[in-house]
Structure formats: C-alpha cells, structure tokens
C-alpha cells in the first residue's frame, strides 16, 4: 500500500478478527515510525501521537461489490435478511413507538417489568391487527318483511329501534 506522499507500507498482516464476532476480519497494512514521523501530512493521515499509520480493510472477496450483490440475490441470503429486517423493525418500533429507551422508574426489576409489559402490549396490538383465519360469515337471508320493503322501494333503516322515535 502506498500513502499519498509515496511511502510504501512495510508489510501486510492478518486477517485479524474484529471486535464483533459477526463482522468481517480485517487485513492491516502497517507503516513504520520512521516513515510517518518526519511526514508533513501526518496530522491529516493519523491521530497517533508517536505511532505509525495502520490501515485496515476487509479481504478482497468482501470488497468485490459485484460478487456481494450477486450473493444478495440468492434465496438463502434473502431469507436471512428477512429475519434481520423483522428484528430491526421490532426494535425500531419499541424504541420510537413505545419509548423503550427511557424508563421513569429506577432499578432493574421495575425497568424489566416495564419492558415485559410493553412487549405484551405490542404482541396484543399485533394480534388484534391480524386478519381472522376464518372466512367472514355470510350475511343472513333477508326476512319476508325486508323483501317486501325492497320490492316497494322503501328504504330500510339500519336499526329498527329508531323507527318509533
């Protein structure tokens, strides 16, 4: 790797695991102190006071966007992403819709109770919004009196109780 001032890195190391177990490992290119100390562009290049510049980047197979985009079109990737999307949507609903980040009570047991009760409320809300699995019941056949009213083009009231008032 070559820096903007033309210095060539002294070696490549890795891939090193990152702090997250799900993140990709990084390959690190290292420059020496003797390369970085006298450089006038050092403040723009690194924040290290006395060390040298280290540049980390993912392995080549993860950098190739065309291969990654092709992998994103596979049914397996879409199935895994659908699960992740559902989880992220639920977390977003809790955080923004139900204020789960703040708790008016002190103490872990009461905060836990708030989280559990909020989860129950969200589940009830979601269940009430689902469509019934059974088909809607068929409407009742009109009575003889209703058929007579329809034949005479007399409008039917929605409630027969309102007729006498």
Image (cartoon, rainbow, N blue to C red):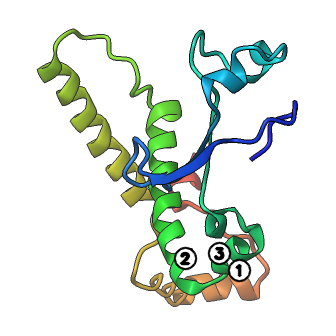
- Work out which quarter of the rendered image holds the C terminus and state it: top right
Location of mark 2 (residue): 77
- Give percent across and percent down for residue 163: 59, 56
Mark 3, other Cα within 10 Å: few <14 / some 14–19 / many ≥20: few
N-term mark: 3 or 2:
3
Residue at the left extreme of this rendering: 109
As drawn, the label of residue 72 is: 3
Q: Secondary structure at mark 3?
A: loop
Q: Residue at x 39, y 28 (%)?
A: 100
* Side of 67 where 97 appears, left or right: left
Whether residue 152 appears in this view of the structure is yes
Location of mark 1 (residue): 70
- Give percent across and percent down for residue 141: 51, 90
Whether residue 23 appears in this view of the structure is no
Residue nearer the viewer, 82 or 34: 34
Q: Secondary structure at mark 2?
A: helix
Residue nearer the viewer, 62 or 45: 45
N-term mark: 2 or 1:
1
Write down the quadrant of residue 117 in the picture. Answer: top left
């Amino acid at each position: 790797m070559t820096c903007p001032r033309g210095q060539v890195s002294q070696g490549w190391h890795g891939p090193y695991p990152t702090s997250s177990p799900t993140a990709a490992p990084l390959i690190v290119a290292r420059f020496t102190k003797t390369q970085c100390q006298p450089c006038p562009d050092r403040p723009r290049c690194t924040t290290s006071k006395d060390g040298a510049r280290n540049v980390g980047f993912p392995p080549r197979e993860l950098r190739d966007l065309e291969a990654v985009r092709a992998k994103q079109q596979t049914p397996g990737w879409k199935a895994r992403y659908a699960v992740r999307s559902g989880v992220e949507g639920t977390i977003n609903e809790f955080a923004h819709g139900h204020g789960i980040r703040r708790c008016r009570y002190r103490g872990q047991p009461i905060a836990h109770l708030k989280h559990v009760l909020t989860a129950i409320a969200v589940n009830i809300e979601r269940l009430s919004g689902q469509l019934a699995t059974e088909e809607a019941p068929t409407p009742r056949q009109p009575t003889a009196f209703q058929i007579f009213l329809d034949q005479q083009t007399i409008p039917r009231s929605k409630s027969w109780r309102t007729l006498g008032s």
